[in-house]
């Protein structure tokens, strides 16, 4: 949309940019530029105009818009970037785009999800104006056995993006929850389709939900003991979602380029992981009687699996499933 392109140009300038320059760069009329500026002002962007100098952006609302995010990315990175107000689930929207031929690296972002999906059939609380709901399409040309590596790599990529955006540290709970102050600020849900014949991964939809500016009242009682937001953990300070969204895209692009060389991701995963050394209850994908098994997490293996010494003395490497970690999420 033209207003996104106009916003991208004026966001990148520290000084006035003339209407003529904008219309020349975008190949549109001055009148079209004027209407785009009018539409942006109606959305809350404060744009000063001066007859001789042109336009100057003086203040932006914290709206997740394609223009504001694109302004923070390399020039052509907004090509496969889709930003929406409200969707059911960004994973579902991206799945449709993927089946219509969207390339690896395509990104869908929404301000709000009406049917945000969590792991194991749970829902993911996705209020408007507060979080980032982002799905990244990756076609890794790998065997299915590598898939849990990918979700761990993603946890590292998002932790790096948070550090680069706000200078804040986060930790990882195996397999891929991100925590601040031992409460969850980000969940990752990777949905995969595999080619039956070769067993190779056809597409991965990597869904990332980050709680950025939520207040405690945004979380319903059933998740309030587990979830928090970056803002809550920093005294109510508000953070730019566009900045973090752009850094997540850059971090995920880097992940795509590095795949499958895991050296950086493994080292960083071990550094950020707080599961190893803790008492855990493991819930593998196939559990009997709904009961988990208790033990102690010993460490992270080279394939990102979790080595657990169970209370009966047996040792197992968990490649998937979930663990409850004593001392986290109300588990005592
Ligand atoms: C979890 O912690 O259970 C995983 C949560 C994943 C949430 C994200 S938000 C973006 C993407 N779209 C979805 O519907 N889910 C993922």
Image (cartoon, helix red, strand yellow):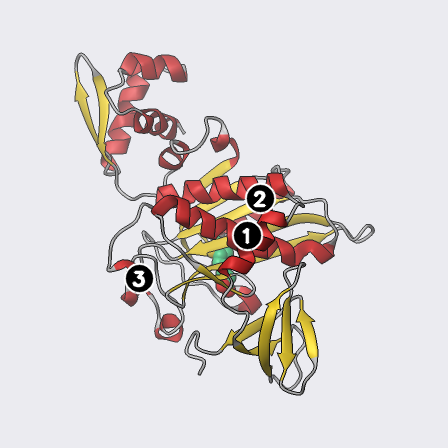
Looking at the image, is 99 positioned above or below residue 80? below
The residue lying at 62 percent from left, 37 percent from top is 103
Q: Residues within 10 Å of mark 3 (few under 14, many from 20)?
A: some
Q: As rendered, which of 199 and 38 lies closer to the eye?
A: 199
Image disc number at residue 183 = none
Q: CA distance from mark 2 to mark 3?
A: 27 Å
Mark 2–mark 1 Cα distance, whole angstroms, equals 8 Å
Q: Name the residue carrying label 3.
A: 233
Measured from the top left, where is residue 82 in percent x and y? 47, 39
Q: Is mark 1 within 8 Å of ligand 1?
A: no
Q: Earlier in the sequence, mark 2 or mark 3?
A: 3
Q: Which mark is residue 154?
A: 1
Q: Which residue is mark 2?
A: 255
Furthest residue toward right: 197
> Could you say which quadrant of the image residue 106 lies in?
top right
Q: Position of residue 212 (x, y in %)?
A: 35, 54
Res 29 seen here:
no
The residue sitting at 61% across, 56% down in the picture is: 191
Neighbours of disc 1 within 10 Å: few (<14), some (14-19), many (20+): many
- SS class, disc 3: helix
Element assignment for label 2: helix
Is residue 262 at all visible to an observer of this figure?
Answer: yes
Residue 299: x and y in percent read 60, 68
Asked if disc 2 and disc 1 are in contact, CB closer than 8 Å, the reply is yes
């Amino acid at each position: 949309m033209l207003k996104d392109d106009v916003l991208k140009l004026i966001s990148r300038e520290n000084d006035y940019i003339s209407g003529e320059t904008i219309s020349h760069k975008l190949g549109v009329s001055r009148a079209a530029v004027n209407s785009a500026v009018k539409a942006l002002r109606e959305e809350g962007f404060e744009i000063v105009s001066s007859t001789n100098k042109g336009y100057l952006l003086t203040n932006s609302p914290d709206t997740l818009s394609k223009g504001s995010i694109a302004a923070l990315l390399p020039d052509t990175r907004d090509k496969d970037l889709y930003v929406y107000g409200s969707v059911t689930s960004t994973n579902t929207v991206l799945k449709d785009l993927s089946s219509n031929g969207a390339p690896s690296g395509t990104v869908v972002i929404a301000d709000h999800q009406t049917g945000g999906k969590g792991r194991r059939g749970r829902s993911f609380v996705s209020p408007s104006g507060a979080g980032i709901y982002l799905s990244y399409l990756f076609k890794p040309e790998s065997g299915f056995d590598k898939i849990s590596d990918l979700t761990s790599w993603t946890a590292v990529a998002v932790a790096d993006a948070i550090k680069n955006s706000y200078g804040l540290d986060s930790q990882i709970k195996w397999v891929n929850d991100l925590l601040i102050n031992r409460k969850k600020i980000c969940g990752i849900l990777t949905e995969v389709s595999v080619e039956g014949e070769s067993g190779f991964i056809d597409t991965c939809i990597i869904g990332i939900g980050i709680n950025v500016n939520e207040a405690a009242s945004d979380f319903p009682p059933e998740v309030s003991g587990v979830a928090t937001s970056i803002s809550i953990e920093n005294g109510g300070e508000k953070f730019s979602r566009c900045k973090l969204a752009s850094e997540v895209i850059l971090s995920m692009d880097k992940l795509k380029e590095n795949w499958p060389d895991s050296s950086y991701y493994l080292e960083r995963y071990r550094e950020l992981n707080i599961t190893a050394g803790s008492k855990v209850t493991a819930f593998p994908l196939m559990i009997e009687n709904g009961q988990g098994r208790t033990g102690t997490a010993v460490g992270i293996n080279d394939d990102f699996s979790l080595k657990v010494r169970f209370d009966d003395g047996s040792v197992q490497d968990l490649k998937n499933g979930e663990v409850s970690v004593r001392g986290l999420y109300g588990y005592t």
